Image (spheres, rainbow, N blue to C red):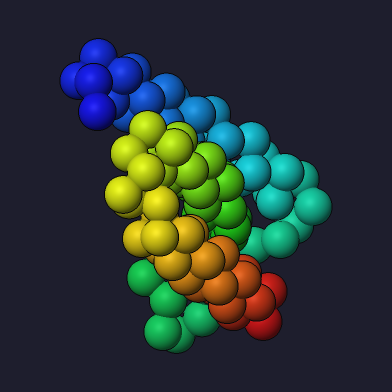
Amino acid sequence: MNWFFATGLAALAFFASLAGTKAVLGFMTGRAIVDRPNERSSHTGPTPTGGGLAIVGVLIPVWCAVAWMTPDAFPSALVISTLAVVLAAVSWTDDLR
């Protein structure tokens, strides 16, 4: 893989993750989808949840782009992407409960 492409892809993923996380957290805060502190919490005020959705939403296409550039990595990227989606679904379900 070309270093220029890899660096550009990493920078794009970084900035897309930042922007996506800000958007998701704003959306969650606006709809009061937040964790309320209790005796076991490390935070003292309501904290928005779901910021990881943006990161997973950015990483899946990045992994697909890497797999496209390096065909030998395609099976691994498919497994990693599938597991990431499963983990995101479980984490999101946990956040809502």
Image coordinates for residue 35, horizontal then vertical, percent: 59, 68
Q: Is residue 15 visible?
A: yes
Please tell me which residue lies in front, 76 or 14. Answer: 76
| Number of dots carrying numbers | 0
Q: Residue furthest front?
A: 72
The residue depicted at 50 percent of the width and 29 percent of the height is: 16
Q: Residue furthest top?
A: 4
Residue 39 appears in which quarter of the rendering?
bottom left
Image coordinates for residue 42, horizontal then vertical, percent: 37, 70
**In the displayed structure, does residue 25 sit left or right of residue 42?**
right
Height in image: 21 above or below 35? above
The residue depicted at 58 percent of the width and 59 percent of the height is: 49
Which quarter of the image is occupied by the N terminus? top left
The residue depicted at 32 percent of the width and 39 percent of the height is: 70
The residue depicted at 64 percent of the width and 35 percent of the height is: 23
Please tell me which residue lies in front, 48 or 3. Answer: 3
Q: Which residue lies furthest to the right in this view?
A: 31
